[in-house]
Amino acid sequence: MPSQSAAFPFIPTPIRQALDYWTDAWQRGVLFLDALRERGNVYLEHARSGKPPVLVFDYEIIVDGRTLARPANYALAAIKAPDGCPATDPKKRPFVVIDPRAGHGPGIGGFKMDSEIGIALQQGHPCYFVMFFPQPVPGQTIESVARAEAAFLDKVNALHPEAAGKPFVIGNCQGGWALAMLAAARPELVGPLLLAGSPLSYWAGERGKNPMRYAGGLLGGTWGASFAGDLGHGTFDGAYLVNNFEQLDPANTYWKKLYHLYAAVDSERERFLEFERWWGGHYLLNKAEMEWITQNLFVGNRLSAGEVSTEDGALRVDLRNIRSPIVVFASWGDNITPPQQALGWIADLYDSVADIRVNEQTIVYCLHEKVGHLGIFVSAGVANKEHSEFASALDLIDVLPPGLYEAVIEDTHPETPGLEYVAGRYVIRFEPRDVADILALDDGRDDERAFEVVRRVSEINQSVYDAFVSPWLRALSSDASAALWRNLNPARFERAFFSDLNPALAAIKPLAEQVRARRAPVAPDNPLWAVQEAVSANVAALLDRYRDARDAAQEALFFSIYESPWLAAAVGLKPAAERALKSREHGWERAERLRLQRAALAACYEHGSPLAGFLRLLIYVAIGTGVVDERPFNGIRRVMRDTGLDAKLTLAELKEIIKRQTFLVREDEERALAGLPALLPEAHQRRQALELARELLALPGKISDEKEGRLARVAAVLGLDGIAPTAAAESVASAPTDAQPAVPAPAPAPAPAKAIAPEKTEPAKPRRRSSKTAAPLASTEVPAPAAKPAPRTRRAAPKPPKA
């Protein structure tokens, strides 16, 4: 609609611009208040309907945790594929998303079509969602929740007995530490894990950047959570957690979020209401649950130290017991779970990557530069890039050799080498890292000693509170008083105030309808609009300066108290120089584990199938840099399909073969190389193995000089010196499949070679698709190469240490 002043052209331009601006400002103000009123109504309606998950997908509850032998207010929902998604394939690996129970209700993992759930559905995977209800079951504990989640995963595995692998389980934020504990206690239930924005090392962080970690110490420990639980008559109001999150960024809470709605009210209203429906859906926890979380995790930091046990003490939760690959997704823009807290547990458990390999654990991490905490779960850009690539590369992640890797995701272009072997828009590779790289993300860990003092002070204060204060509060509280405290919480009160419950707002709705009918937006070049934007920026900057000053003062106060030697001595702690930060695996345990591995695999150097020999060859050549690229892996998977070997070899068997051959190469390169002729006894097998390895290694780009040198060494050992690679490999021998046992007996000589379907034509995939790729060592397990090179790496590739 044209501006009101346009009807009076004789009015001077400055006055006309002022009239236009103030007309628009008044209209935006009315629409802004109407949006707040509607937010309050949405909040009330959501509460009246039982606060269902804010999923955009239809779902069906298939297991209700409240009916289990040990009940919990959790449920397992099967997600129904919406129109436009491919039909769900029950033989594909199922996805399970566990949302955080951190004050809000469930649904953030499926909040949009471009989300963790949406990506899985678009690729045809069965998808399940672990949801929870607003009220906890009386007597429910964290162990009750863990047992319920284990029952859910049992159900998912039972529903998909023929799936390509165990479920890919995603734990968002606090759902991540719950998932990590479950996977450590019941490793057989899960496939790869994705811990998205999940804190596991609660003391870690940088000075001047991560103020949230000081909250427990400045409050005197965990007694505050118990106090809130007693005020709630045995329940803890999740709105308190939301209050804490909002105070981290007062500029966003008190100004930027609301100003953005005011400035763009015509286009922003629906998105604002959609998000606020989840943000305002506050859930409750039992007092015992919140006490466990604060005492064992937030302040105690006992999870990564291996100090968490079941209630009966029968099982200690040790994260080193997780057998599936662990993928950690963190962001530098996350002020709730910074990368140090998402990754510091690795340095808590392991001294070096050699320790990780000996423990046969695979850890992958991906660092985003800017996205905030919630953006990890709800950003369409993150979903379509990071989550999509991890979903596409699941099988590769599942067969990665033990070690520590950083996932690097890059956009493709028409000239990208091996483009036809890239599943989507992006190409992903896994670059080897060491524990030193994790430590380098932090500014040092000496500051964490102060948190040991916090833990001891907290234990003392908690004991005093439990003995002298809690009994009186529990006697005085009631359901009515608990409801009063909950309704007075600012997060709830402001929504109820700006709703139709408030008669003072009765005129807003009809007035807003009139404004929409006569809407006259101001021109974007109006000078007063520029003034408004400048004022808004200054208000936000002022609140940011307040935040920075507040955080700096709190940090200085924290360390002045908890780094005091007298306080450490008063609570019974040794001086900092005499205290170890964490307890790790004893040296003799690691040495014994390594000795047993060496003894079990000693016979494998000279015995194995021809394809095991091909994999060893490929690993030997690629292990110099240790970079694993998806393109060679996808090339091998195509080979498996072309030769029918994918039907003979499961992903789990493939993983074991790759792990075994990688261990042998890392343990003794020279012996592993010398054993190749025994695994590839026939000349045509050797030629085909070398040619196929060369072709796969070239998919990401030009083969490096180092790899060319290793290929030459392999050729010399196999007696192929001077033999130029042929344009196409002949059809391959059909030797027996060797799904090698952990300790193989000396293998008999492989069966004579016999050609397999040389006339088989290749699908229309034009690039580098010679018959040598179509029919590789069709004799045995077709493992994916354990370490595939990328065109470049971030650092020089030293000779890998022995694991």
Image: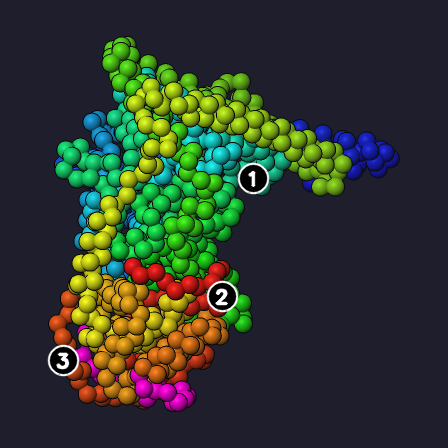
Stretch of the chain drawn in magenta: 718-739
Quarter of image, res 312: top left
Q: Residue at x 25, y 39 (%)?
A: 306
Q: Which residue is mark 2?
A: 792
Q: Which residue is mark 3?
A: 748
Side (left or right) of 312 relative to 423: left
Instruction: Kindly state the secondary structure of the residue where label 2 is placed.
Output: loop
Q: Residues within 10 Å of mark 3 (few under 14, many from 20)?
A: few
Instruction: Kindly state the secondary structure of the residue where label 1 is placed.
Output: helix
| Scheme of colours in the image | rainbow
Quarter of image, res 607: bottom left
Going by the numbered disc 3, the residue's amino acid type is: Pro
Q: Residue at x 61, y 31 (%)?
A: 540
Observer-side mark, 1 or 2, equals 2
- 305 or 137: which is nearer to us? 305
Q: Residues within 10 Å of mark 2 (few under 14, many from 20)?
A: few
* Alpha-carbon span between mark 1 and mark 2: 43 Å
Count of numbered tags: 3
Q: Which residue is mark 1?
A: 268
Going by the numbered disc 1, the residue's amino acid type is: Glu
Observer-side mark, 3 or 1, equals 3
